[in-house]
Image (cartoon, rainbow, N blue to C red):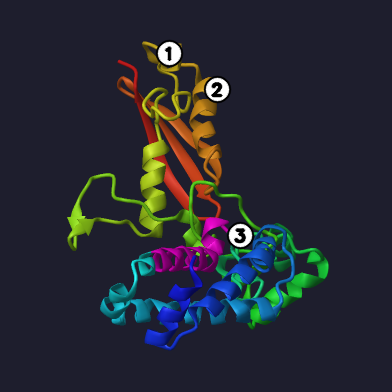
Amino acid sequence: MNSTVFDIFQKITRFNIKSYFEQFADFVSTDYQRISDFYSKGAVLKQEVIEKLERLDSQMQQLNDLFNIYSRNLSKETAEIWELLDFFETTKVTLLTIWNSARWMRSTKDIFQSNVVKQDYNLHQGQNFEMLATKLGYNDANNNWAQIAIDNDIREEDYTYEGGKKLKISFMNDYSFQVNTVIDSISGERLYGKDVDRVLTFENNDLKMLGYHDTIRQQTAILLGLMKGSVPEFPTDGINKDVVGSNINALQYPMLLRQQASVFEKDGRYRSIEVNKMYVVEDSLVIELQITTRLGEVLDEQLILNTA
């Protein structure tokens, strides 16, 4: 790019855009990888890297305003100003991508937050704090359980083996979930993601979006009873129609249940699926299922198969 266009821009706006581009190039070539390593490898991220990113972001926003304010004056000077604008827009997209690295890498970590994720949790029946610490993946559960009690200001007489005590638990970010079906910073209810309502509806002049909990319930309903061939992208997912058979006696129960469970196992948002009860109503087989999400939320569902 001709250096003259940098001088023209600085003369009109009093902003040294050439210096901004140089700082941007230096950051991308050296510091961008450090941010990537922070999310992907758990590397330590120095404060100076964050400060550089903040300075670049501040300059980017200032430049964005200057291009809008002086657009008419700049365009009169030289056609190269459009090339300069295009280059600036590229840096803008790159910086926004870096800011959202936690979402693209599906990380629970944030460069401005601590390495600890907090989450609401109900103590289960028969579960003590040491068992909870083990479940959360604490390195030294025999001793770390006390921190859970301290964080929640819990005394020994405040809880019993009947469970039900609501706690605020913490776990380090190396205790994480691999969820490939959601693009977001995977923390708390964000694990469920957000989706468009399967019944296309307009709301506030846009497609209706579901919240986190409604999204996981909708996804559960979609996966429940999914038949092979119904999803073109994944033709082998779901229950084989041949397994159902022509009557109740012909049902191949083990294979049917394995095929149903497999679609939930592929989705990292679910922890387990269990059969509570199976019974026949006229020509239909009813299977009562208990589906547990990665956040410990239990969804009681029914799979009804008509064999007539």
**Which residue bears the numbered disc 2?**
254
Residue plotted at (39% across, 33% down): 303
Q: In which quarter of the view is residue 274 placed?
A: top right
Q: Residues within 10 Å of mark 2 (few under 14, many from 20)?
A: few
| Camera sees residue 164 | no
| Residue stretch in magenta | 83-106
Q: Residue 124, image x and y in percent?
A: 60, 60
**Which residue bears the numbered disc 3?**
125
Q: Amino acid at mark 2?
A: Pro
| Camera sees residue 71 | yes
Label 3 or label 2, whichever lies nearer to me, is 2
**Which residue bears the numbered disc 1?**
242
Viewer-side residue, 82 vs 160 = 82
Q: CA distance from mark 1 to mark 2?
A: 13 Å
Assess whether residue 101 is covered by the magenta stretch: yes
Q: Earlier in the sequence, mark 1 or mark 3?
A: 3
Q: Residues within 10 Å of mark 1 (few under 14, many from 20)?
A: few
Q: Earlier in the sequence, mark 1 or mark 2?
A: 1
